[in-house]
Amino acid sequence: MRYRTIGTDATTRREVSVLSLGAMLMGTRTDEATSFAILDRYAEAGGTFIDTSDNYAFWVDGTRGGESEALLGRWRRSRGVGDGIVIATKLGARPTVPATDFTKGIVGLSAEVVRESAERSRERLGVEKIDLLYAHVQDPATPLEETVGAFAGLVAEGTVGLLGVSNHWAWQVERARRIAADAGLPGYEVLQYHHTYLRRRTDQPSWRSPDGQEGVVAGDLLSYLRAEPALVPVAYSPLLAGAYVRDDKPLGPEYDHPGTPARQAALRKVAAETGATVNQVVLAWLIGGDVPFVPLVGASSVAQLDESLAAVDLELTAEQRAVLDAAH
């Protein structure tokens, strides 16, 4: 396994594996025995960066979420997991009532919600301190100053270590970090967004915004990350739920543009040269890019996880990266 540092402060920064494991469906669609086997294998391989959220996976059983956090808490206790494993969770996108989608609304990022949600997450995870806490989605109804102050307050009292943000516009991230810096408060240091090798159209509205999908890496966010190299980006859904390799998982309309076939061909070419799978090439491309991402992968079996773990040791040559990067 390889590792990188998240966080800039000597008292809160952590070393994490360059491949993160997503626990989104653990405790719901992925049963406990299988989930424990996947978690055990990840830890055995040197993995130290596990991701969840307080709303996972509400849509499976029509709850408000928390099943994934609760399972991770049971795994931690049963295995005696200590500080070597960094567990990141998120808050703000829990449905206001039991639901199977977001149509009835979400709790948002008010100071009251941030404090209450973080406390409930600590209880489910069975930890005194949350290693990394994300603002899950933007909340237009709450001033950024209020959310920034609430997150910083959790760090000050010692119940949260590092702060992160996901699914916000790049300008919101910069503004929130500026508010924190001007007030001498800790700010967001880890950014979690959807990112993969295939390029996604950004002109289609999302369920939250007519302006497009704020949770997808695009040019503005990449430019921001290049300008702020201390920030660590995490890429969720990098393997597109199997769509790179499974005929029964077709790409959606967001990938219906001329660049997709060209990049698929480049992937197949490099995979053939390396003897790796297409999925492994995607992960290696993310890990070793000029803006290096931490891929966040899910797994429903140990075999799926092992395929992803092998990508950590896949070193693409400069020529192979040039082929991948040049495809449009």
Image (cartoon, rainbow, N blue to C red):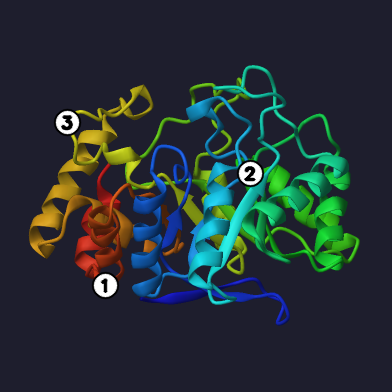
> Which badge, 3 or 1, comes first in the chain's sequence?
3
Dividing the picture into quarters, in which one does residue 199 lie? top left
Q: Looking at the rendered structure, which numbered label has been put on residue 79? A: none
Give x and y (percent) for residue 238. 37, 47
> Is label 1 or label 2 in front?
2
State left or right for residue 162 relative to residue 119: left
Q: What residue appears at the point 81 percent right and 45 percent down from the top-left corner?
A: 116
User: Is disc 3 placed on a helix, strand or loop?
Assistant: loop
Give x and y (percent) for residue 236. 46, 47
State left or right for residue 290 relative to residue 129: left
Q: Looking at the rendered structure, which numbered label has been put on residue 247? A: 3
Q: What residue appears at the point 49 percent right and 74 percent down from the top-left corner?
A: 4
Q: Amino acid at mark 2?
A: Asp
Q: Residue furthest bottom?
A: 10
Q: Amino acid at mark 1?
A: Asp
Q: Amino acid at mark 3?
A: Asp
> Which badge, 3 or 2, comes first in the chain's sequence?
2
Q: Looking at the rendered structure, which numbered label has been put on residue 54? A: 2
The residue at which mark 1 appears reads as 313
Residue 181 visible within the image:
yes
